[in-house]
Amino acid sequence: MGTQEEERKRGATMTTNIERRAEYLQKLRDPKWQRRRLEIMQRDEFACTKCDDTTSTLNVHHKYYRFGAEPWEYPDEALVTLCETCHQEETELAGVRRGYEREIVELIRVENFNPREVLGLLSTLAYHRITPGIMSEAIHDATPDLSIGKLHVIAMYDADQDATSN
Ligand SMILES: [Zn+2]
């Protein structure tokens, strides 16, 4: 495969991401989401669940995203009311998570990836409470035949090897 082909693919992925983002923002205007977020805010008594702020603008935050799910198609426990400040903090943390996901995807792409590195990243992801759903999506985009399950098996196998060789 030539470099030109890779460049073309990368360009196509970027366009898809921008389109997905625009589509998502449009969905947040849907009355079904307006109703869902109001339900969550009522449940949380119109206060930030992290700092109890009741005076700042409130947002309803998705703790995780599931591939193909509409913003309003999440269970109660996936949605939480946050003030602007806390929402920004959570969104930044989500950015950190996506960074790790990309690193893992890159490691898998490289032919001679080191399973030990993958294992290290997996523990970091577990620490940041990365959901398998989020990670599966990121991995699926890069290598459709590799699943989070398989990745765990690779990492666990390496851990076993370490345990038996020491
Ligand atoms: Zn807050």
Image (tube, rainbow, N blue to C red):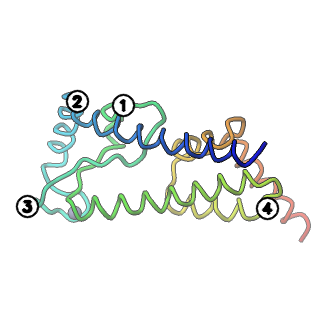
The residue carrying mark 3 is: 55
Disc 3 under 8 Å from ligand 1? The reply is no
Label 1: how many Cα within 10 Å (few below 14, some 14–19, many 20+): some
Q: Indicate the quadrant where residue 115 lies.
A: bottom right
The residue carrying mark 1 is: 70
Which of disc 4 and disc 3 is earlier in sequence?
Answer: 3
Check contact, mark 4 vs mark 1: CB within 8 A: no
The residue carrying mark 4 is: 114
Q: Quadrant of the C terminus?
A: bottom right
Q: Residue at x 64, y 47 (%)?
A: 7
Which of disc 4 and disc 2 is earlier in sequence?
Answer: 2
Check contact, mark 2 vs mark 1: CB within 8 A: yes
Q: In front of the other: label 2 or label 3?
A: 2
Q: Is residue 1 above or below residue 31?
A: below
Alpha carbon separation for disc pair 2 and 1: 10 Å
Q: Which mark is residue 30?
A: 2
Badge 3 marks a residue whose secondary structure is: loop
